[in-house]
């Protein structure tokens, strides 16, 4: 089951994407599918109909892995009073 991530690419706004498995430290790239802006709109620099994108690690600043619906019950969200 794919996991949703927030991908922070150098020089670009963060985007949402799906990954099939978490990257291994020895990987030299990351493959993502279903890339979209955080508001759900299409990413402007991708051609229409693109199924997957491969990024080399030197372009990635960091990745946020979002919890799935099943894991959401176990996650404690922080809040302010």
Image (cartoon, rainbow, N blue to C red):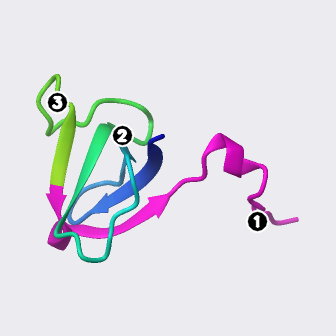
Closer to viewer: mark 3 or mark 2: 3
Q: Is residue 80 magenta?
A: yes
Q: In the rendering, at what x and y percent does residue 22 appear?
A: 40, 60
Please tell me how crowded label 1 is: few (under 14), some (14-19), or many (20+) other residues with Cα within 10 Å: few
| Residue at image mark 2 | 37
Q: In the image, what residue occupies the spot 44% across and 52% down?
A: 5
Q: Name the N-terminal-most of marks 2 and 1.
A: 2
Magenta range is 55-81
Q: Is residue 38 left or right of residue 76?
A: left
Give the spatial CA distance, label 1 vs label 3: 36 Å
Q: In the image, what residue occupies the spot 28% across and 47% down?
A: 32
Residue most toward the left?
A: 47
Q: Name the N-terminal-most of marks 1 and 3.
A: 3
Q: Mark on residue 78?
A: 1
Q: In the rendering, at what x and y percent does residue 41 appear?
A: 35, 30
| Residue at image mark 3 | 50
């Amino acid at each position: 089951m794919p996991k949703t991530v927030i991908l922070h690419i150098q020089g670009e706004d963060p985007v949402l994407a799906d990954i099939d498995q978490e990257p291994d430290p020895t990987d030299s790239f990351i493959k993502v599918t279903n890339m979209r802006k955080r508001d759900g709109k299409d990413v402007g620099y991708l051609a229409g109909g693109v199924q997957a994108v491969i990024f080399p690690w030197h372009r990635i600043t960091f990745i946020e892995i979002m919890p799935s619906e099943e894991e959401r019950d176990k996650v404690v969200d922080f809040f302010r009073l």
